[in-house]
Image (cartoon, grey):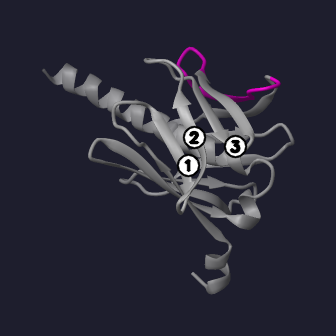
Amino acid sequence: MNDSAAEERLEFEWQQPKWTCERYRLRRGEMLLGEMVWRRWFSDEALARVGEDAWLLDRRGFLRDRVVAYERESGALAASFIFGWMVEGEMRLPGGRRFDWRRASILGQTWALLDEAGETALELELWTGWFKRQASLRVSQSRAAGPDAGLLLSLAMYLALCAQQDASGAAAVVTTACI
């Protein structure tokens, strides 16, 4: 990676302060930028806030194959995501911007959000330590900047957590079937 590419990448982290609750805090260094909170137990609905903006995120559909984000204040659709094969898929924003959500590594929990040109706008690596989940994000300042940046950061974490939840459910089904 050359120096210009390194300079345009911003680093963020989602951190789960307590393993007992589904609450995550978005930080850049020591600065708290936002949070995501699941509103109810056994629900996919989460409230995400970054700065002054807030969205309700939820999985919809019979097979929970869609994710929608609504602006909290107005209720307007802020983004939609349709899962494709292997929890990858396409994200659409109302202004016409489109992104592809792809697994960036075969075995790990690394995901990439690609813009329409196929370039990486955001990369997220999810891991668990001491029962708490965390994610590091590397964001292309030129490709993911703008008024949708907070929404993209929130949706990336939400989608990664959905993928992890689905993988855990599938593992439980396979384990139960083998017993």
Left or right: where 156 falls relative to 129: right
Q: Which residue is mark 1?
A: 26
Residue type indicated by callout 2: Glu
Quadrant housing residue 27: bottom right
Taking the magenta stretch, the answer to whether it contains residue 72 is yes
Q: What residue do we see at 79% from left, 22% from top?
A: 75
Q: Earlier in the sequence, mark 3 or mark 1?
A: 1
* Magenta part of the chain: 60-74
Residue farthest along the bottom direction in this orientation: 3
Residue 54: x %, y % from top left: 70, 34
Residue toward you, 163 or 58: 58
| Quarter of the C terminus within the rendering | top left
Residue 172: x %, y % from top left: 27, 26
Q: Which residue is mark 3?
A: 151
Element type where label 3 sits in the image: helix
Q: What residue do we see at 42% from left, 43% from top?
A: 16
Residue farthest along the right direction in this orientation: 95
Q: What residue do we see at 76% from left, 46% from top?
A: 98
Q: CA distance from mark 3 to mark 2?
A: 11 Å
Q: Earlier in the sequence, mark 3 or mark 2?
A: 2
Element type where label 1 sits in the image: strand
Contact (Cβ within 8 Å) of mark 1 with mark 2: yes
Residue toward you, 116 or 9: 9
Q: What residue do we see at 85% from left, 43% from top?
A: 96
Residue type indicated by callout 3: Leu
Q: Which residue is mark 2?
A: 35
| Label 2 crowd bin: few (<14), some (14–19), many (20+), radius 10 Å | many
Q: Which mark is nearer the camera, 3 or 2?
A: 2
Q: CA distance from mark 1 to mark 2?
A: 6 Å
Q: CA distance from mark 3 to mark 1?
A: 12 Å
Residue type indicated by callout 1: Leu
